[in-house]
Image (cartoon, grey):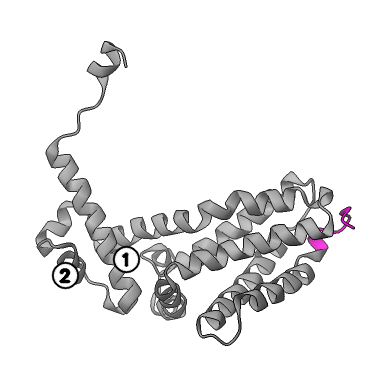
């Protein structure tokens, strides 16, 4: 590093480092709390206590409980989707040049990534699914649905639709966005149900993934017509 670069490097104060550490502690505390109690157990007092700070200090880091949940929701969505986004897009983009075996292998790999991500914190996954209809029914303002963790599952489904659309576009296919949204919503519901079924040990993960592959072939077939797989 040259002298000029060294002189212009940003200086981070101990106060800023301490604040960043406290923010991370609050986010981790909120994640633990939601994973154990769901939306009904969330409160600033509990989150602050779990982070080891006084409740008034909460406002030095977040304007409100919603602000904290929004940041946590964004982090969770990115953590969930980042590892698999490119894998799904590439699988759809390369559909025409993949033979049946290779496509099935890629599809299985992508589905396994979804299951692995959900099982990293299955308690959180359960609470998100359980709280979603309750929160949507209790909130009157449509804009309010974007607050907190209650809309995370819907946000992820919308992102899945965008991922699928990007893959279709890169493969040169035409489609109706509304049809993609409908198919993704149906597929997401199937994925959620089978993940919970595996958690409850009603069947194995390989059985669930095999069932999903067959279902996806039927559900998305009309989007992928004209491929050269054999």
Point out residue 10 in the picture as x, y percentages from the top left corner.
24, 27
Instruction: Check disc 2: other Cα within 10 Å, few if <14, some if 14-19, many if 20+.
Output: some
Q: Which residue is mark 1?
A: 31
Q: Is residue 131 above or below residue 10?
A: below
Q: Residue at x 15, y 68 (%)?
A: 49
Instruction: Check disc 1: other Cα within 10 Å, few if <14, some if 14-19, many if 20+.
Output: many
Q: Is residue 39 visible?
A: no
Q: Which residue is mark 2?
A: 45
* Marks 1 and 2, the one that precedes in the sequence: 1
Mark 1–mark 2 contact, CB under 8 Å? no
Residue 7 appears left or right of 169: left
Q: Nearer the viewer, residue 125 or 74?
A: 125
Depth-wise, is mark 1 or mark 2 nearer the camera? 1
Q: Is residue 99 above or below residue 207?
A: above
Point out residue 80 in the picture as x, y percentages from the top left corner.
49, 59
Q: Which mark is residue 182?
A: none
Magenta region includes residue 227: yes
Q: Residue at x 28, y 61 (%)?
A: 28
Q: Quadrant of residue 224?
A: bottom right
Point out residue 180 in the picture as x, y percentages from the top left corner.
69, 62
Please name the predominant secondary structure of the magenta segment in the image.
Answer: loop
Marks 1 and 2, how far apart in space? 14 Å
Point out residue 94 in the picture as x, y percentages from the top left corner.
76, 48
Residue 225 appears left or right of 15: right
Q: Secondary structure at mark 1?
A: helix
Residues shaded magenta: 222-230
Q: Nearer the viewer, residue 189 or 66?
A: 189
Q: Is residue 18 above or below residue 216?
A: above
């Amino acid at each position: 590093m040259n002298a000029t670069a060294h002189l212009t490097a940003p200086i981070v104060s101990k106060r800023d480092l301490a604040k960043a550490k406290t923010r991370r502690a609050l986010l981790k505390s909120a994640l633990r709390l939601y994973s154990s109690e769901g939306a009904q157990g969330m409160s600033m007092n509990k989150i602050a206590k779990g982070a080891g700070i006084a409740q008034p200090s909460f406002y030095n880091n977040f304007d409100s409980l919603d602000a904290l949940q929004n940041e946590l929701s964004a982090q969770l969505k990115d953590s969930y989707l980042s590892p698999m986004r490119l894998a799904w897009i590439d699988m759809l983009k390369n559909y025409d040049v993949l033979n049946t075996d290779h496509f099935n292998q890629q599809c299985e790999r992508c589905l396994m990534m979804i299951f692995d991500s959900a099982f990293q914190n299955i308690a959180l996954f359960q609470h998100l699914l359980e709280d979603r209809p309750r929160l949507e029914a209790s909130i009157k303002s449509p804009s309010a649905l974007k607050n907190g963790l209650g809309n995370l599952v819907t946000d992820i489904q919308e992102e899945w639709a965008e991922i699928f659309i990007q893959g279709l576009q890169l493969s040169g296919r035409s489609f109706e966005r509304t049809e993609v949204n409908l198919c993704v919503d149906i597929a997401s519901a199937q994925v959620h149900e089978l993940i919970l079924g595996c958690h409850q040990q009603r069947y194995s993960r390989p059985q669930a993934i095999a069932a999903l592959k067959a279902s996806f072939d039927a559900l998305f077939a009309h989007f992928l017509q004209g491929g050269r797989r054999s």
